[in-house]
Amino acid sequence: MRFEAPSCFDMAFADIQVAPLSTYWDGSVQLSATIVNEGSQPTPDQWLMRGFLSQQATLNPSTARVVGDWRLDSVPAGGARVFEVILPISNELPVLPHFVGAIVDPDDELDECSESNKAELFTEPVTISATASVDVALSPVQYHPTTVDAGAVIKLSYELTNTGSSGATAMR
C-alpha cells in the first residue's frame, strides 16, 4: 500500500488587521487579510470572502452582521496573498464596540483539504460613534527645487494630520 497526499487547496488566515479602530456611522474600516493556501493546488479565481461585524468577541455567522462579500484572486499552492477590502459602517449599527471578522469560502462552494480553518476575528474591537469628529489639516507644502524648467520633475513633501476625536474613514 502506498500513501498518496491529497491533491487539494486549503485556505486559512495567517493574519488579519483592521484600521482605524475608531469610526462613525456611514464611515468605514479597512480589513487587511493575509490568506495562505496550505494545499498542493492553487485556489480558483473569484473565490468568496465574507466580512462580519459582531458585538461579541466571537465570530458566529448566525448572530454577526454581514458587511461585505468580495470575490478574490487565486492564492498559489503553498503561497500567501494579502487582500485589503473596505467594510462600510451602517448608520443602523448600535453605537457600541464591534469586532471585525471574516470567513473564506463561507458558502462551502469549494472542496478544501480542511474546512475547519476558514474563520478569523480581529482581537480588538472597533469603536463606532454616531457622528464623525474629523479635523484634517495639511502642513505647509515644501518643494524642491524652488524653480523648475517646463517638463522637469519637482518633489513635494507635506504631512496630513487628523486632530479630531474620531479616525478618518478608510479609503482607497
Image: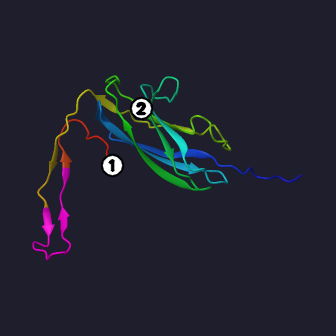
Q: Residues within 10 Å of mark 2 (few under 14, many from 20)?
A: many
- Residue 25 disc label: none
Circle nearer the N terminus (2, 1): 2
Q: Nearer the viewer, mark 2 or mark 1?
A: 1
**Disc 2 residue type?**
Phe
Three-letter amino acid code at the position of disc 1: Arg
Task: Tell me the magenta residue range.
Answer: 142-160
**In which quarter of the view is residue 113 placed?**
top right
Magenta span contains residue 145: yes
Instruction: Locate residue 74 relative to residue 17 in the image: left or right.
Output: right
| Residue at figure coordinates x 38%, y 33% from the top left | 125
| Residue 77 point in image, percent of width and height | 62, 55
Q: Residues within 10 Å of mark 1 (few under 14, many from 20)?
A: few
Q: Nearer the viewer, residue 119 or 146?
A: 146
Relative image position of residue 123 (x, y in whole percent): 44, 36
On the image, the x and y values in percent for residue 43 come to 61, 50
Q: CA distance from mark 2 to mark 1?
A: 22 Å
Instruction: Give the residue at x 42% y 32%.
Output: 99
Q: Residue furthest front?
A: 150
Residue 155 sits above or below residue 117 on the image: below
Residue situated furthest right in the rendering? 1
Residue that badge 1 annotates:
172
Residue at the disc numbered 2: 99
